[in-house]
Amino acid sequence: MSTSTRETPTVPTQPKRHGFRFPSAFTVLFGVTVAVWLLAFIVPTGAYELDGDRAPIPGSYAGVDAGLSFGDRLMQLFMAPINGLYGVKAGEGGFIGPYESGELFGAVGVFMFVLAIGIFITMSMRTGAIDAGIARVARRFQSHGVIVIALLMVLFSLGGTTEGMAEETLGFYALVIPLALSLGYDRMVAVATILVGAGIGVLASTVNPFATGVASEAAGVSIGNGIGFRLLMYVVLVPVGVLFVLRYAKRVKAHPSRSRVTAREGDAELIALGVGEAPALTGQQKSVLAVVGTTFAFMIFAIVPWAQVIGGPDATSYGWQLDWYFPELAALFVVMSILVGLIGGLGEKGLTDTLVRGAGDFIGVGLIIVLARGITVIMSNSQITDTVLHSMEDVVSGSSAGVFGATMFLINIPLAFLVPSTSGHAALAMPILAPLGDFAGVPRSMVITAFQSASGVVNLITPTSAVVMGGLALAKVRYDEYLRFVWPLLLGLVVLCTAFVAIGSAL
């Protein structure tokens, strides 16, 4: 056939949609930045007096003059991202800028830590050890479907509560879908195993650096504060999610017609194929998994304020207590990333390429944190932060601690929809919400728990999440099918979380 008569194949295109598309976290934060900058022109400026611990004293709010010209305010908008990264808070006056002398206010420490843990996670995945480990465990219990689903959900929840496992879960759908189908379940069981498992882990984060860590840093408390209560939530809520999924899985296996998702093309082949034989873990893969587990265990040990947890907040740290924070943790994950790459046999080029790719994959999270911190800088330099705080003081100061806790949880639900990034949400909201706990006599760690619980609930369903929409696309499950499946669990989690935070605040 000559080229003159050959037909050029056409690629089918999706019809253009003209409906509303919710903007990304970057667009939302940019809009909030501009909105806050404009509001600073009309919101009265003021400040609280501070006590010895630098906490605002209730009832001490008074109006002040920010002393900013229009040019100064324009420069504040222009420099917001830079100040959000490495702005320094002056020792006198508290003005934040890159050339001041005083205490670092920017989020460069968190930014570097996010990149470091991104490198570590990507390096670990690149070696294949994590995939092989999951496959081995799943294959070993393949004849016991209930045990497999429950075990996988617990493993994903551990990843969620310790390191905020989210986008990393997308790589497991290719394994879990054929496994679920071969066990007599449907694609919704596979989706729930991953999404609900990791999602509830993130909801009940104990030391998740992207939620608990960023929020603790923004609230001015240690990431270990409140870890006991968060661990209790994890122990209670994870079984609730597991039992919900297992109940559905048993029903579908007994009555396939009751499935929430219709069969897809290729399901029969996947059912027949199963997951195949999982090869035994090599010594190299076992070593990588040991390093990964040891690193996260050591991180937990290094950040927990052991003496303060045991003896109270004023206790002197033990001699062996490390009291590490973001700088030390960033260094830890960079060093252990290199060790994992060497053990995994990636070679010099593979190691360096993965290091760069890992940092690149997580730089979006880091930039979101920086943008959110830049908004806080604008509010601080314009001296409207305390005004916003004062406007909410009357609302919470007269309420009981329990009502305050429940209110904090409910307030964070719409905020989580507006800023679906847990890191961005934490960096934006905690500087304002955390001090409210001081007025109500509620620990700031409980305000953090309320935030991350609300964020975790919303991020189980929000259509702005790549984790939710990407996972559903990989599983070929429609969003409306997933919503019909998950809404009873969602309602139960809202009730339980509200009760947990209210009781924890009252205690």
Image: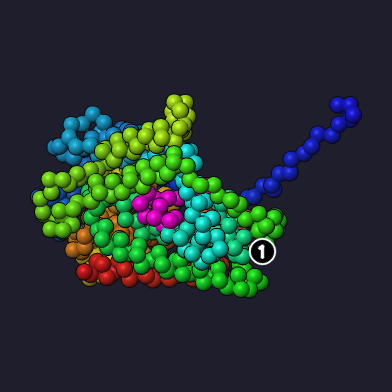
- Residue at (16, 39) in percent of width and height: 93
Indicate the position of residue 36 as horizontal and vertical percent values.
35, 46
Q: Is residue 60 above or below residue 35?
A: below
Q: Depth check: 362 or 97 in front?
A: 362
- Which residue is more in the foreground, 489 or 305? 305
The image quadrant where one finds the N terminus is: top right
Residue 488 position within the rendered picture, expressed as x and y whole percent measured from the top left: 49, 71
Q: Nearer the viewer, residue 123 or 47?
A: 123
Residue 199 on the magenta span: no
Tell me residue 486's x, y (percent). Answer: 51, 66
Q: Is residue 161 magenta?
A: yes
Q: Is residue 276 left or right of residue 442?
A: right
Q: Is residue 234 visible?
A: yes
Q: Which residue is mark 1?
A: 262
Magenta residues (range): 155-172
| Image coloring type | rainbow
